[in-house]
Amino acid sequence: MAAYLIGTITVRDPEAWQAYVAQVGATFGPFNGRVIFRGEKAIVLSGAAHGQRVVVVEFPDLESLRRWHESPQYQGLIALRNQGAEVVLTAYAD
C-alpha cells in the first residue's frame, strides 16, 4: 500500500530553504519516493492551514517512507531544513 509524506512549510530563510530543496529530491530515489505535488497556499476554505507551502511525496509503502526519513542522506539535511523553514512532516498510508 502506498504511503504519502505531507510536509507543510513556512519559509524563514529563503536562501537556506532553496539550498535544502536543491538537495532533498535526490534523497527520495533510493527509497522509490517521488514528488507528487509542491505548491503554495492559495486560499483556505475551512479551518486554519499550517504553513505557506506544501509538498506531497509518494512512497511504495510506509516502511520505505520510514527508511527514507531515517537515512543518513536525509538526516544530514535536517539542520539546513530547520534553518530554512518551519516544517511539519506527517506520513499517511492508504
Image (cartoon, rainbow, N blue to C red):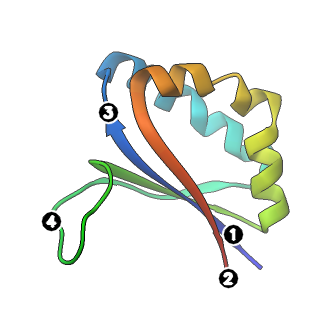
Q: Which residue is mark 1?
A: 3
Is the residue under label 4 in contact with that under label 3 (CB below 8 Å)?
no
Q: Is residue 9 left or right of residue 31?
A: left
Question: Under tag 3, what secondary structure?
Answer: strand
Precedes in sequence: disc 3 or disc 1: 1
Alpha carbon distance from label 1 to label 2: 6 Å
The reply to whether callout 3 and callout 2 are in contact (CB within 8 Å) is no
- Residue matched to label 3: 11
Which mark sits nearer the N-terminus, 1 or 2? 1
Q: What is the three-letter code of the residue carrying label 3?
A: Val
Q: CA distance from mark 3 to mark 1?
A: 25 Å
How many residues crowd around disc 1 within 10 Å: few (fewer than 14), some, or many (20 or more)? Answer: many
| Amino acid, disc 2 | Asp
Look at mark 4 in the image and give the residue it sits on: 43
First along the sequence among labels 4 and 1: 1
**Position of residue 14 in the picture relative to residue 45 (left or right):** right
Q: CA distance from mark 3 to mark 2?
A: 29 Å
State the quadrant of the C terminus: bottom right
**Earlier-in-chain disc, 3 versus 4:** 3
